[in-house]
Image (cartoon, rainbow, N blue to C red):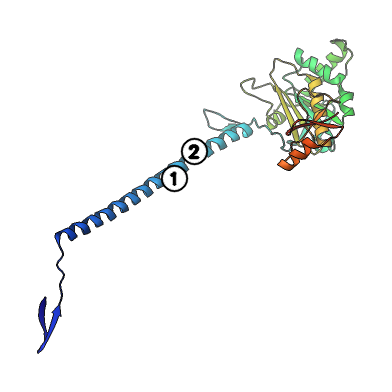
Amino acid sequence: MIVLPAQPGVFLTLSLKVISMDEKRDTRKHIENQFREMRDYISRNVRDLELEKEFDKQAREITEYVDQNIKKFRGGTADPTTGETTGHSMPLIGDDAPSFTAVTTAGEINFPKDYRDKWVILFSHPADFTPVCTTEFMTFASMQDEFKALNCELIGLSIDSIYAHIAWLRTIREKIEYKGMKDVEITFPVIEDLKMEVSRKYGMLQPRASDTQAVRAVFMIDPRAKVRAILYYPLSNGRNMDEIKRLLQALQKSDAEGIATPANWQPGDDVIIPPPGSCGAAKERMEAKEESKYCLDWFMCFKKG
């Protein structure tokens, strides 16, 4: 207890608490613990921030890589010497079919304007006066009425002049007999594409196959001018025209009835009903007894052709 004079005749009494050594150690330990907790908290947040930054960096790199490859796929291939992109674009299924105006063996066409409300099979071939292409054109021509009956028009293309096209088609008509086909007249248009403008728009040029010849590409385009199917064959192998017709019929069947077609489907075969979207619908489908429908399992049901 300490007594101090405050004013004359007045004394102020102070009570001072003496801090023991043990209390000092406890206080120090408490402060040190708080400091360590704060340091650990800061360290964790720094690590989290660094991880987040690294994650963001990797995400950006992945996104850039994917974007670059999509651009290469859809917009062309970069020249390794200049870094510039060459035009080898390719529309994808569901895209609008690229429009063009072209000179053909049947006169000028404006696509898709001239083919409104029709299906179109646009196909390319490597060159005129080549044997594989000759067999393909003769087969397509022999089936042209079958395609017309399906509201579908044929359009051919190669990187040749209109004069080469005419000479080749005349040769086919006058001289070539193949598998019972003779005197075959090619009346569907064949596009002159010396500047490769249409070929580039449709990705028909593939540099590792040839820089000057289009591969055997097939684009099925619906009456709304949407690309619905794409087939690619190498230069060395001819296409199966029956398969092209079958695929066209399958697409038309799917559009008309909202169904899918199984492997090796042919017109008249059973078709697949879209899978149910809920447990209740799946149960109802399995329990339903319809003469025209049957299920192999809840997700795999068919409608009789």
105 or 241: which is nearer to us? 241
232 over 236 or under it: above or below = below
4 or 247: which is nearer to us? 4
Q: Quadrant of residue 160?
A: top right
Q: Is residue 49 left or right of residue 155?
A: left
Q: Is residue 184 left or right of residue 94?
A: right
How far across and down, in percent of the image, does residue 131 sit?
76, 12
Q: Residue at x 37, y 45 (%)?
A: 47
- State which tag comes first along the sequence, 2 or 1: 1
Mark 2 element type: helix
Badge 2 local density, few (<14 within 10 Å), some, or many (20+)?
few
32 or 161: which is nearer to us? 32
Q: Which residue is mark 1?
A: 52
How far across and down, in percent of the image, does residue 269 sit?
84, 25
Q: Residue at x 67, y 25 (%)?
A: 205
Badge 1 local density, few (<14 within 10 Å), some, or many (20+)?
few
Q: Quadrant of residue 295?
A: top right
How far across and down, in percent of the image, does residue 56 sit?
47, 43
In the rendered image, the quadrant that contains the C terminus is top right
How far across and down, in percent of the image, does residue 222 sit?
80, 35
Q: Which residue is mark 2?
A: 61
In the rendered image, the quadrant that contains the N terminus is bottom left
Name the outermost residue toward the bottom.
9
Q: Is residue 86 left or right of residue 6?
A: right
34 or 206: which is nearer to us? 34
Q: Residue at x 76, y 23 (%)?
A: 161
Given the image, on which type of amino acid does mark 2 rest? Glu
Q: Which numbered disc, 2 or 1, marks the residue closer to the eye?
A: 1
